[in-house]
Amino acid sequence: MVAKFAIILSLAAAAYAGLLPVSKVVYAEPEAPAHYDFSYSVHDDHTGDVKQQQESREGYAVHGSYSLVQPDGVHRIVDYTADKEHGFNANVRYEGTPVHPAPAKIAYAAPVAKLAYAAPVAKVAYAPAPVSYSHAPVAYAAPVAKVAYAAPIAKVAYAAPVAHVTYSSPAISYHH
């Protein structure tokens, strides 16, 4: 068992040190710069969502634009380019003027019925009640019963183990 462990450990150390050959992954076809054209458009009259985007890539240069109608009604248009030499550049422009609708007026309904309050039926008069204080004597009485402590009835003793325990394996043995 120890010999197998030593052999595996020495092979791992040799592989880590570079003494054993290790295969490398080689791609079959060379990578070429991407070329694509992409676009989409949304015009939803129900939700008011209006937007579009188009983008083209030729090698490492990307150019495109996107536009959308903002919540205030202004049309935002972004034209952008990106390449290795100049990085990402965007030109943002806005068309239209913001429209801020007036806040909705809240209508309040008139009360359904008018409430009438009646005069009190009777008047209630409160008079202070006479208060008198007296001092009562305090007395102390002895306890009625006494509490006594009794020793425990039974004793608990510890006995030695009944059986002898033994465990063994091919490499380690244990006796108790």
Image: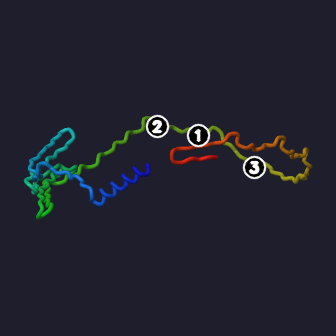
Q: Nearer the viewer, mark 3 or mark 1?
A: 3
Q: Amino acid at mark 2?
A: Lys
Q: Amino acid at mark 3?
A: Pro
Q: Earlier in the sequence, mark 1 or mark 2?
A: 2
Q: Earlier in the sequence, mark 3 or mark 1?
A: 1
Q: CA distance from mark 3 to mark 2?
A: 40 Å
Residue at left 81%, top 43%?
155
Which residue is disc 3 drawn over? 128
Q: Nearer the viewer, mark 3 or mark 2?
A: 3
Q: Quick check: 43 above or below 17? A: above
The crowding category of the residue bearing disc 2, from other C-alpha atoms within 10 Å (few below 14, some 14 to 19, many at least 20), is few
The image shows residue 109 at horizontal and vertical percentages of 37, 39
Q: Amino acid at mark 1?
A: Ala
Q: Nearer the viewer, mark 1 or mark 2?
A: 2
Q: Earlier in the sequence, mark 3 or mark 2?
A: 2
Residue at left 45%, top 35%?
113
- State the image quarter where residue 9 is shown: bottom left
Q: Please tell me whether mark 3 sits on a helix, a strand or a loop.
A: loop
Q: Is residue 30 left or right of residue 12?
A: left
Q: Which mark is residue 172?
A: none
Q: Please tell me whether mark 2 sits on a helix, a strand or a loop.
A: loop
The image shows residue 83 at horizontal and vertical percentages of 11, 60
Which residue is disc 2 drawn over? 114
Q: How many marks are shown on the rendered structure?
A: 3
Which residue is disc 1 drawn over? 119
Q: Is residue 33 left or right of residue 47?
A: left
Q: Quick check: 45 above or below 97? A: above
